[in-house]
Amino acid sequence: MSKRTKKTTGTTRTTGTTRTTRTTETTRTTGTSRASGAVALGIALALVVLCVAIYAQTASFGFVDLDDAGYVVTNPHVTGGLTADNITWAFTTTYAANWHPLTWITHQMDVSLFGMNAGRHHLTNLLWHIGATLLLFGCLRAMSGSTWRSAFVAAAFGAHPAHVESVAWVAERKDVLSAVCWFATTWAYVAWTRRPRAGAYALVLLCFALGLMAKPMLVTLPFTLLLLDYWPLGRGAGHWRDRVIEKLPLFVMVAISSVVTTIAQKHGGAVGSLDMIPFGERIANAALAYGRYLTMLFWPGDFAVLYPYPRPVPVGAAAAWAAVLAIVTVGVWRFRRAQPSLATGWLWFLGTLVPVIGLVQVGVQAFADRYTYLPSVGLFMAVAWGVEALSRRWQAPRAIVGGTAMVVIVLLAVLAHRQTAVWASAETLWRNAVAVVPTSAQAHNSLGRTYGNSGRVAEAAEQFQIAAGLKLDIATARDVFPNLGRALMAQGKIAEAIPHLERAREIDSQVPDRWHQLALAYFGVNRNDEAIAAWQQAITLNPRFEDAWFTMAIVLAANKRTEEARQAFAEVLRINPSRKDARDMLTSLTGK
C-alpha cells in the first residue's frame, strides 16, 4: 500500500511538473506570438505612412492628356457613373484595346462618389497601392515566416520610384488594382496549401478571376505559384506533376484571358505587325528592355512617361544584356539548392515580364516604367533573402544590415516623391519627358499640344518644329504635321504652314479635315482655285462637312462664282437649318 502510494504520488508530481512546463511553454509561445503580431502591425502602419508620404501630393493633381480622357474624362460610360447600363458596357466592351471590366467599374464608382474631382481619383489609386503593399507584406510573411525581410520587400515595392507611373497616373488604375488581386490570390493559395478545402480553392479562383478582369498581366500568376511551391513553400520536391495538375483551372482561365486579350488588342489596333517591327528586332529590344528594367530598379533615375522604340535597335548593347541575363540565370540555377530564394526571385522577374517585353508588340513604346510594378517583387525578394544569407555568412551585425535597409528605403522614397511631382499636370509630365528623352518626337508633339491648349502658340509651334525634325513613325507623323501647320497659321505664318499641311494631306489623304485645313491655308495666300479644289475634295470625302461647305461658299462668292456659292450655302442650310450666317449670306446673294 505504501509503495503504491509512493508510485502514485511520484507520477502525480511528474505529471504536475509536465503540465507546468507545457503551460510555461504555451505562455511563452503566446507571448512571442503577440509580440510578433504587434511588430507586424507596427510595420503595416509604417508602410501606410510611407506610401502616404510619397503620394498624398497627388490629391492636388489633375488629369493628364495621356489616356485619362479615354478612361475617364470624355468617356460617357464612365462619366455617367455606376449604373446598370455602364456595368453592362464594362463587361462587353473592348474599348482601349483591352477587356478589363473591373477596372472600368472602379472608375465608374469613383465618378459616382467624387464626380470629376481628379484629386479624389488619384487618392483612390493611392488606396489600392497601399492595399497591394500591405497584402504583399502579409502574404510574404505568411509564406516565409520572416517579418523583417517581408517588410523590406513590401517597403521597396511601396516606395520604388519606378512604380510612380502605376500609382500617380489615373488611367493606370489597372496596375494597382490587379496587384491587389495578385497578392490576394497568392495569399489565398498559401492558405489552401496548408488546409486544402474546396472553399479555400474557390477563393483562389475568385481572386484570380477578378485580377484577370482588372488587367491581363495576371496570366503569369500561376507560374509564379509554381515558383513559390519550390521556395518558400517547399512543396515541389518530386511532385511537380501534382503541382501543375492542381493549377489546371488557373491555366484554363489564363488561356481564355489570353484569347480575349488578343482579340481586344487586335480589334483596337494596338498590336504591331511583323512588317512594322521584325521579330529579330523585337528579340533584340526585349534584351535591352530587360537591361533597362534591371538598371531602373537597382539604380533608379531618368524616368519618363514614354521611351520610343529604338530604330535601328543597337545590336551590340542588346547582345551584351542578353549575355548578362544568361549568366545570371545560369548562376542562380546552379545555386538553387543552396539559395533557392535567388532562383525564385530571378525567375519571377524574368517570367512576369514576358507578356510586356515586346515579343508581341503592343503600342509604340520600347519599354515602360509601369511594367516593373509586379515583376520587381521577384528581384526584391532575391535581394532581401540573398543579403540575409550573405550577412550570416560574413557575420555582419544585424544593426548594420537593418540600418542599410532603412537608408535604401528612405532614398527610394525621396526619389519617388520627386518623381511623383512630375505627374502634377500634362505640362510637367511632358516637360520631363522631353528632358529625359529629347529624341522623342511624340513627347515634343505632346508638349506642343499642351502649350497650344493653353494658348501659348509660339511655344507650341517650337515643339512641333522640333518633333518634325526628328525621326518619326507614321503614327506620330500623322499628328505632328497638321499640328505644326495649324500652329504656324495661328501665328500668321501661312506660307510656312503650307508645306506641313501638304505633308499632312499626303499622309492622310482620306481624312476630310486635312483637305479643309490646307484649303484655308491656300485661301490665306490668295491661291483661291487651289483652295476651292481642296474644299471640293473634303466634301467629296464627307458630304456633310458643314465648315468646308461654308468656307468654300464664301470664297466662291468672293470670286464672283455666285451660282456655285448659292448652292454651297444652300447645302450648309440643308445640313444645319439653324445656321443664321449661312441664311444671311444666301439671302444677300439671291436678293430674297
Image (tube, grey):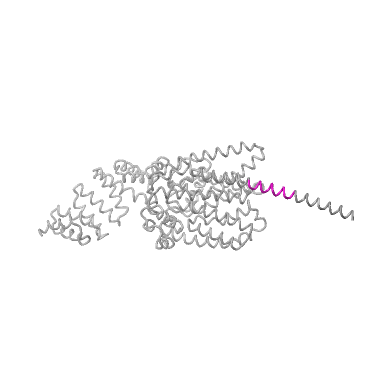
State whether residue 229 appears in this view: yes
Which residues make up the magenta segment? 21-34
State whether residue 327 appears in this view: no
Numbered marks: total: 0
Q: Does the magenta segment cover residue 422?
A: no
* Nearer the observer, 404 or 386: 404
Give how far across and how far down residue 185 sits, in percent: 55, 56
Which quadrant: the N terminus? bottom right
Please name the predominant secondary structure of the magenta segment in the image.
helix
Instruction: Tell whether 316 sits left or right of 197.
Output: left
* Nearer the observer, 445 or 345: 345
Reply above or below: 71 against 331.
below
* Nearer the observer, 568 or 148: 148
Give how far across and how far down residue 238 sits, in percent: 67, 57
Reply above or below: 46 against 360.
above
Give how far across and how far down residue 580 sits, in percent: 18, 56
Which quadrant: the C terminus? bottom left
Instruction: Tell whether 581 sits left or right of 440.
Output: left
Q: Residue at x 25, y 51 (%)?
A: 518
Q: Does the magenta segment cover residue 33?
A: yes
Give how far across and how far down residue 61 sits, in percent: 40, 45
